[in-house]
Image (spheres, rainbow, N blue to C red):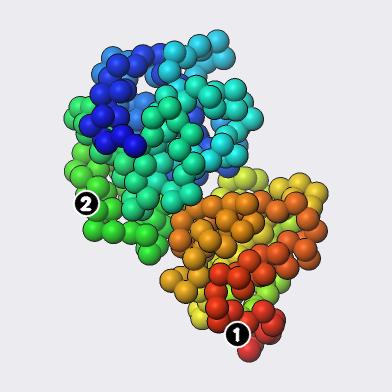
Amino acid sequence: MLSVKEAAEKLRAMDRILILTHVRPDGDTVGCAAGLCAALRQLGKTAFLLPNPELTDNTLPYFRPYEAPEDYVPDAVVSVDIASAGLFPENARPFLSRVELAVDHHPSFEGFGRDNLARPSAAACGEIVYDLAAALGPITAEIALPLYVAVSTDTGCFQYANTTPRTHQVAAALMTTGIDYRAVNKTFFRTKSRKRLALEADMLSKMEFYDRGRTVVLTVPISLMERVGASESDAEDLSALGAQIEGTDCAVTARELGHNVWKLSLRTGSRVNATRVCALLGGGGHAAAAGATVEASLEETRRRVLDAIARVVPDFVPEPVSGTEA
């Protein structure tokens, strides 16, 4: 495992660099990619981001200025915030064996790069990329803005349990460059489309409680997305909704990606280790935020995730309870 200094030296020796982001890209992977690309260009390097077809309206503005042209041929490949080979977008898979440096912060990180820079204690991969960019040169506003997006979004605007004093120190350093951090936080945390509100209303009306009301399961079938006319932007970070429900410390959001293909997202408190639960389902992530994909009916998917929680949590009670009892 490389140190930040060693990783920075490795980047200094590269040119014609291509940076990869993960499937269903969030603010952390996009912000890290854009911030690192800006830092590399500041050194005079040729650097681009591999196009990602699943960008949302919120993340697209940070990605688009650095997007690689179709005819771009890289000499070196770097990945950011990608924990496993299974999270490579389809167009990134040919580059898997060519990743010279992989930067990540997930405990489940597979270490697939020829060299790796990983720090599971970091709340966001953006914290690591901030250190890496600082080792490459001065942090300008162009570098700082996407890195602030990375840190803010992966900590729920600094509300999640993964937030540390170091997180705030990084955010403060980025803010001193003069970026419009208020606009970032308003876009990602204080603005919702009417279609997003319709999604949330349906999810809440059909939520199911288990485990004496401590575990809640919310579902987002494709039919719901189609009925309200919701886009990927409308559905961004729906997994945060369940964690806001009073009395719960384990929120499961099941979103249908295809017929009988469900993406599970867990947001948990200290009682439930989300990484261990999702590992039993073939996924991974962090202790308080993890995910997995299950190919089964909704009923079977629900059964599998509740069984996985029961295997990890000694005092889990599988019986359902009504919303009023919860």
Q: Label 1, label 2: how many angstroms apart (C-alpha)?
A: 39 Å
Residue occupying the far bottom of the picture? 325
Q: Residue at x 32, y 20 (%)?
A: 41
Label 2 crowd (10 A; few <14 / some 14-19 / many >=20) = few
Quarter of image, res 100: top left
Q: Position of residue 263 (x, y in %)?
A: 66, 53
Q: Position of residue 170 (x, y in %)?
A: 25, 47
Mark 1 highlights which residue?
212
Amino acid under disc 1: Arg
Q: Left or right: where does residue 38 sit relative to residue 272? A: left
160 to 19, vertically: above or below? below
Amino acid under disc 2: Gln
Q: Residue at x 20, y 45 (%)?
A: 173
Image quadrant holding the N terminus, namely top left
Q: 155 or 229, which lies in front?
A: 155
Quarter of image, res 314: bottom right
Q: Position of residue 57 (x, y in %)?
A: 54, 40
| Mark 2 secondary-structure assignment | helix
Mark 2 highlights which residue?
169
